[in-house]
Image: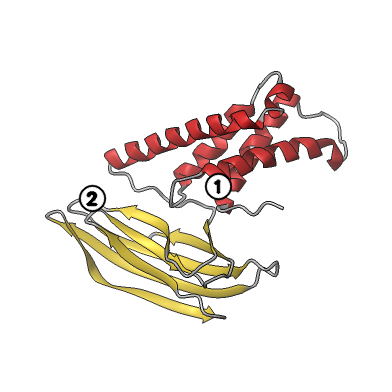
Amino acid sequence: MFIPANTTVFTAAFTGALAGIMSTIGIPSSNTTNASYASAASLAEGYAEVVDMLWDVSPTTQLDVELIQGMCFATWEDLAPIDSYKADPASWALRVGAMIKVIHAAHSEYTAQGITEPLGGLPVTQLTTDNVAARVARTPIADGAVLSLRYIVSVHSTDGSGAVLGEWEVKGAYQVVAGVLTAAYAAVITNTFIVGAPVGPTLTLNGNTDVDLNVTGIAATGLTWLISEYTL
């Protein structure tokens, strides 16, 4: 069983690859059984594993999700002969590495244009297995700008039960004046409920350019965090 490090990335890669594979082999015009597509789904899952393992962009934004899905589709669309490519998974890492470089370039273009990347419809996911803070969102703020942030953060057990252990609302407002980033008012982090002892989310400054949302789990414990962003 494969456990994705980033379920959002894995899902985007899987759905994009599967759609591309079906485009290549052809979608039947008549009903068949689920088993007819098992090999295609397995192939897409294997490719998505490579994407998940090589992914190095944090946090995951809507830009990432749509590029991953679209580029994975393009990788497998009209690929012939598909059998020779699927038999050589060692070559997948080269394509995935190139895809991630394209996504880095897209991030750079958004930054250059002063565009804030939305987190998108799918919640950002983060797996933690220790009590070290992990960054799950980074919001750039341009000089002279004032920005309000609001997140809903929930944490779930990875023991198979999927039990929700905690939920928080995180709100903050930040400004950059003469190149210096400061909080316009103190961040408000409200805990709705909690089971166990996850530390929960924090907002921190990354120099004078960005505001980071971080989560801290529990030592030697697998937790899955879901983060949704809302505009104030």
Q: Where is residue 199 in the image (x, y as percent from the top left)?
A: 45, 75
Task: Look at the numbered disc 2 and give the secondary structure of its residue.
Answer: loop
| Amino acid type, residue under disc 1 in the picture | Val
Q: How crowded is mark 1: few (under 14 residues within 10 Å), some or many (20 or more)?
A: many
Q: Residue 142 carries which label?
A: 2
Q: Is residue 216 above or below residue 135?
A: below
Question: Does residue 136 appear anywhere in the picture?
Answer: yes
Q: Residue furthest top?
A: 80
For the point 52% across and 42% down, the residue is 54
Q: Is residue 24 left or right of residue 130?
A: right
Q: Which comes before the other along the chain, label 1 or label 2? A: 1
Which quarter of the figure has residue 52?
Answer: top right
Q: Which mark is residue 9?
A: 1
Q: Where is residue 44 in the image (x, y as percent from the top left)?
A: 68, 38
Q: Residue 32 carries which label?
A: none
For the point 34% across and 48% down, the residue is 116
